[in-house]
Image: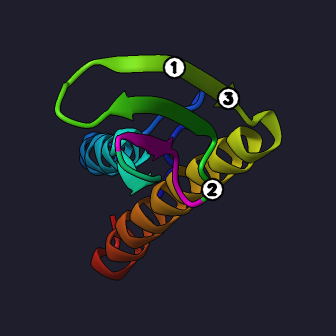
C-alpha cells in the first residue's frame, strides 16, 4: 500500500481549530473580567480594579466621593512581568489543547487503519 503524501506545510484539522477558538474565547473573557475591591473612609473611597488571569497584569485605582458616581484621580498601572506570565500561560494552554486534539484525531485514525 502506498504511503500517503506528507503535508507540505503546517495544517490543523477543522475540529481542532473550532475547539481552539472556544478555548481562546474563554481565555480572553477570563483575562478581561474585572475583579474589584473597594476600601477607604467616608466620604472618600478607593475603587480598585484588576484585570488578567492568573496574575493581575492591569491595575486601576479610582478615588470616588461617596454620594456621587464621579471618578476622581484615575491611576492605571500595567505590570509587564505579570502580563508576560498571562501571555505565556495562554499560549501554553492553547498549545496543550492543539496537541491533545491532534493526538486524539491521529489515534482514532490509527485504530481505524486510515
Q: Quadrant of residue 6?
A: top right
Residue ID for mark 3: 77
Q: Which residues are magenta?
A: 43-54
Q: Nearer the viewer, mark 2 or mark 1?
A: 1
Q: Quadrant of residue 32?
A: top left
User: In the depicted view, which residue is nearer to us: 29 or 47?
Assistant: 47
- The residues bearing labels 2 and 3 have C-alpha atoms spaced at a distance of 14 Å
User: In the depicted view, which residue is nearer to us: 110 or 67?
Assistant: 67
Task: For mark 1, give the secondary structure.
Answer: strand
Q: Residues within 10 Å of mark 2 (few under 14, many from 20)?
A: some
Give the left or right position of residue 48, taking residue 6 as reference: left
Residue at the farthest right position: 81
Residue ID for mark 1: 74
Residue ID for mark 2: 55
Task: For mark 3, give the secondary structure.
Answer: strand
Give the residue displayed 27% in from the left and 40% down from the top: 14
User: In the depicted view, which residue is nearer to us: 113 or 99?
Assistant: 99
Amino acid at each position: 500500500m502506498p504511503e500517503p503524501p506528507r503535508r507540505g506545510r503546517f495544517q490543523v484539522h477543522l475540529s481542532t481549530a473550532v475547539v481552539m477558538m472556544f478555548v481562546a474565547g474563554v481565555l480572553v473573557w477570563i483575562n478581561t473580567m474585572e475583579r474589584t475591591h473597594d476600601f477607604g473612609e467616608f466620604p472618600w473611597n478607593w475603587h480598585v480594579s484588576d484585570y488578567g488571569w492568573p496574575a493581575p497584569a492591569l491595575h486601576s485605582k479610582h478615588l470616588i466621593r461617596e454620594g456621587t458616581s464621579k471618578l476622581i484621580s484615575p491611576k492605571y498601572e500595567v505590570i509587564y512581568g505579570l502580563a508576560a506570565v498571562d501571555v505565556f500561560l495562554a499560549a501554553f494552554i492553547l498549545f496543550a489543547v492543539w496537541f491533545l486534539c491532534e493526538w486524539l484525531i491521529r489515534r482514532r485514525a490509527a485504530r481505524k487503519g486510515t
